[in-house]
Amino acid sequence: MANPSDHQPDWATRRPVGTGHVVGFRTTQGADVWLGVPYAEPPVGTFRWRAPRPHQGWQGDRLAVAPAAPACQPPSFGVETEDRYIGQEDCLYLNIWAPSRPSLEPRPVIVWIHGGSNMRGQAHSYDARHLTVSQDVVVVSVTYRLGLFGWFRHPALRTGADPADASGNYGTLDLICALRWVSEHIAAFGGDPGKVTIAGNSAGGWNVFSLLTSPLAEGLFHRAVVQSGAVLTLPPSLGENLVDAASPGSPRSSGELLLQLLIDDGLAADRQDALRQLEGWDAARTADYLRSKDSRELMWAIEDPTSRRVAHPPLAMAPIMFADGYVLPKDGILSALREGAFSRVPVLLGATRDEYRILLFIFGRTLSFLEHHEDDGFTVLDPPRFYLAGDYLSQIMQIEGVFGPARAICAHQPGHVFCYRFDWDALDPADWLGDVRLGAAHGLEVYFVFGHLDLGAEFFHHRLISGAALESFSELSARIMSYWGAFARDGTPGRGEAGVLPHWPPYDPDGATMVLGRGATADVACVTMAGTRDDLIGRLATDERFPDPASRHLFIDELIAGTDLGLGFTTGHSFTPEDHVRLRAAVGEGKLIR
């Protein structure tokens, strides 16, 4: 995206929003753009950790030519900054792209939810001008609260609170509030409020799953796209209890955070002293204390103590997405999908073939075949084991994030689910990895969805696509945008927007799945992928890349113990002890335990 200072307001983009108007700018590609449009009141002060309140509007004209600040977060990987934390709590804004040319009919709307583990990310990084012009759609990107500002539960905050304020799922409520704004105002920008597609990658896909199963979001969207998503929801106890409670909480629960704040403030000498100090506090005093803290104090307190010594801390995975029984289903997202308790809309979902090759550097820093350097570089000490780990963990991610949810949804609405796997793998080797290749890496298909390589500083793949690969990138990107555009318009990718691409059939019991890109080509083709953990364990049990049973067991042992609890083991995107039992049965007896 161009520097915001280069954007000059164009009064042809003046649009009514409530009691006032917004004025954006016009691009040379033929898109009208509005950046930093507020959809809710700032969630600051006494409104921290409360449900968002719809924005009260303004009088007159509001310039919307520069993005708003991102939500509070550590800098994304690859961002050049001296700041340990960036962003601000006043972050509930959205961005809009619409074709400049007039249309006789309202256009389909795609609401894009950014990724970043729900801990990092910026909505304005996703420049949608190519997507909106090529597919004649309106695109909205949303900023929402992240980390402990977006998902946070403490008993003191629930005293006297209504169910929304007490839920802890503030980031999810932000997205629902943004969808209500779209429903009320998107017609002024040429969008059809009756044809809204929610879409997101990684944590954005995770959020799409949450919106599918939230009763509060029902009716606010009409299609859903999940790219590399997850179906995790956590018990509230994990988010608020102490680690030594009868029902243990997370080391980064609100209870543990409060103890660390008292220590950091010098009000307690250690954890035991902090516990004693809190014995005399009532709910009101605790809530006031938590809301009085500066955002950076809170982010500092929730970090792992070992990460406080590094300039750019790794992800500090606070508990996120609570099964509270009001915003999100009490038994979790996957159970709701299986029971049919979700919005009955067409769903397109998929993942990349080599998801975990890059995720290993984030969530597998203790693995023996990786060496992490202080400058954030890596050495892959054993490339064959690296590729094996990436292969099998990527397949688990596809099973748990794509095929499992697809089967659950299909049971209630057959013919309205469409699956893909993104296989294009023509990236150049990364300079920080030597000769190791990332393949069809996590997040890579996002470039193809938006039709260009400049998606902001936190994205690094644009440095790795060059030469002949640029031609196949452009061709495959045009095909993917066409499929996504057709899905937004008709609820099926079909043969793409122009009706000339290979037919994309619905997912079925045989596992019909569209493969997008093959090697360095733009080819697309439908294949069958059953996708279960038993299938995966069966392949692992006979994989000739392992010389003997002992090496198979050591491999799975290390992945159980060596992947970070952040987004691996706890989301189901990793091996489990139960998988190891099945592997032993498969290797020792030649059959699986079912």
Image (cartoon, rainbow, N blue to C red):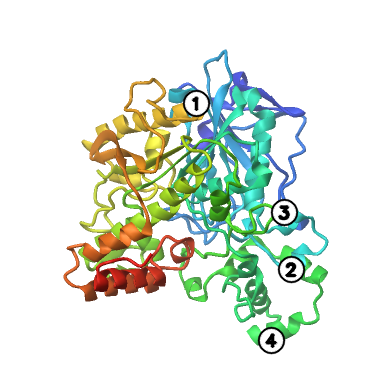
Helix, strand or loop status at disc 2: helix
Marks 2 & 3, CB-CB < 8 Å contact: no
Q: Residue at x 70, y 67 (%)?
A: 154
* 398 left or right, relative to 342: left
Give the distance between the C-alpha atoms of the residues marked 3 and 4, in whole angstroms: 30 Å
Answer above or below: position of 397 versus 307: above
| Kind of residue sitting beneath label 3 | Val
Give the distance between the C-alpha atoms of the residues marked 1 and 4, in whole angstroms: 61 Å
Give the distance between the C-alpha atoms of the residues marked 2 and 4, in whole angstroms: 20 Å
**Residue 367 in view, yes or no:** no
| Kind of residue sitting beneath label 1 | Asp
Mark 2 vs mark 1, foreground winner is: 1
Helix, strand or loop status at disc 4: helix
Q: Which residue is mark 2?
A: 155
Q: Position of residue 510 (x, y in %)?
A: 35, 43
Comes first in the chain, label 2 or label 4:
2
Which image quadrant is residue 517 in? Answer: top left
**Residue 235 in view, yes or no:** yes
Answer above or below: position of 351 versus 141: below
Mark 2 vs mark 3, foreground winner is: 2
What mark, if any, has residue 44 been given in the picture? 3
Comes first in the chain, label 3 or label 4:
3
Comes first in the chain, label 2 or label 3:
3
Q: Residues within 10 Å of mark 4 (few under 14, many from 20)?
A: some
Marks 3 & 1, CB-CB < 8 Å contact: no
* 218 left or right, relative to 454: right
| Kind of residue sitting beneath label 2 | Pro
Q: Which residue is mark 4?
A: 273
